[in-house]
Amino acid sequence: MPENVNLLPNFIHNIIDEDLKDGKYADGIHTRFPPEPNGYLHIGHAKSICINFGTAQKYKGLCNLRFDDTNPTKEDIEYVDSIQEDVKWLGFSWDDRMFYASNYFDKLYDFAVELIKRGKAYVCDLNAEQIKEYRGTLTEPGIKSPYRDRSVEENIDLFGRMKNGEFADGAKVLRAKINMASPNITMRDPIIYRISHTPHHRTGEKWCIYPMYDFAHPLSDAIEGITHSICTLEFEEHRPLYNWLLESLGFDINSRPKQIEFARLNLTNTVMSKRKLRQLVEGNYVSGWDDPRMPTISGFRRRGYTAASIRDFCEQIGVAKSNSLVDIAMLEHCVREDLNKKANRVMAVLHPLKVVITNFPADKREDLLAENRPDSDGTRYVPFTREIYIEQADFMENAPKKFFRLKPEGEVRLKYAYIIKCNEVIKDTDGNVVELHCTYDPESKRGGATASRKIKGTLHWVSVKESLPVEVRLYDYLLKADADNQKDFITALNPNSLTVLSECRIEPSVAWVSQGTKYQFLREGYFCVDKDSRKEHLVFNRVVGLRDSWAKAKRK
């Protein structure tokens, strides 16, 4: 379990402090993270994970992982596995407390029967459209179902026959009997069970009726001894139903779970809906749930974000009661801060321009010492040869006065190496610069007679002969900046969210790196070895650039 997770005071902890002060929950604090296995988790779920597990950690309590697997039409074991991987990757453990709502299907059925016996639930034959019509509006009360006054005996018989598979999907539902005139529409006889002749990924064909989330959730919390059921703000209007179910079934008010809502995470330039993310995957707008442009935890992991940076981000944004929009630059800042401390530096040229150092021997190779990180004692050797590559943007033929990179008759220092001077520019028949001929100062290397000669520009480079070919994938935001103004989010997709550079070169020290290894490419940004990478075909994802707009904004 990571240290210092979600330990800053917040209103949820204030509520828990008051509960403990009042003598409630003497056996300890117990939270849960209850994802539905109908897709991969995204960055918003990471916030919930940090809050739930972090709260349990702060109070030396427990946190369960429970899958809300009550809708077999959308759920899959693939999602169950991915959710476990994501929670573990973030640094959290549920120990032996992994549960499923389906564990409780028998108990939930018994609870539903008990509600019928108490006159608090009934079988309704209205279809979905009719139920919606009868529910009323915010200004008009609902209309009672014509089946609302069925006898207890008839309801028990019909509910048992629903369970036994005698009725088609949608033919009947079980509804809670509450108040059709309630100002809270959620309380107007909500559906608590529906028929679905769909095999379940865990229970197979045992059941053809399944509980609704609003029914299964509070009762699963109660069964597991959860003390504080922490969920996002959209469930605030469902809290009266949560409490009604627990009260109607006789759970003690002093020990039953308490639901607390917090504001969900909304990020700029980002889709934060599982339904929309599924649409992106199924419509082949992205390569999969772990596409590095996706805001899924697996997508961020593949791109090169670290678990520590995501936890730090979730800590910094805090826990609020009202929804707001967070600038994605803040998340990128947290990633930079973490990678700056952990990522070794290497040199890579993304848009190569060949430089021939005419006074360096053609058959000579010189291994130059380079530091891995400024704050580390680690070093490596970089091969220097007669022919090297520099970035195309680091040369300008007609350069302005304050251009401190390479230009005709100009000098620059090569990182870890020598000062070179551009003597000749070679062009193709179309007038494009294809090669530079330069000379080097042999005494300008570290320790040489002219090593301290002042040169304003320092360039990164790689050897033509010794460097490795590498594919680099540059990622931009998945959505354009004006996405909030688009009715259809697909029209707001950024057509330039992925750029693939196939002619890049990198120093040979990375030849044996494994998937997920992260580097800072000098002067370019932070990059991560992609899962598509092979020994004979290196592939790097750009994690984030070097410029930190969030830190700059904070300084202002």
Image (cartoon, helix red, strand yellow):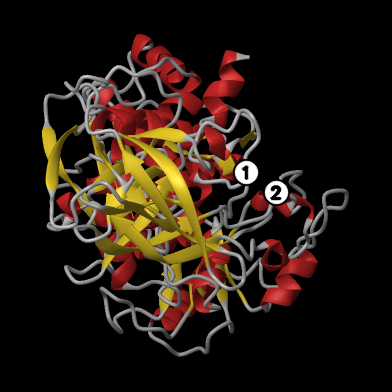
Q: CA distance from mark 1 to mark 2?
A: 8 Å
Residue 38 rendering spot, x and y as whole percentages: 42, 66
Residue drawn at (57%, 18%), measured in percent from left and top?
554
Closer to us: 3 or 349:
349
Q: Which residue is mark 2?
A: 481
| Residue identified by numbered label 1 | 268
Is residue 253 visible to the viewer in this orientation of the structure?
A: no
Q: Quadrant of residue 160?
A: bottom left
Disc 1 residue type? Thr
Foreground of the two, 497 or 77:
497
Q: Residue at x 38, y 14 (%)?
A: 17
- Seen as rendered, the residue at the extreme top is 21
The quadrant of the image that shows the C terminus is top right
Count of numbered marks: 2
Q: In the rendering, at what x and y percent does residue 9 appear?
A: 42, 15
Front position among marks 1 and 2? 2
Crowding at mark 2 (Cα within 10 Å: few <14, some 14-19, many 20+): some
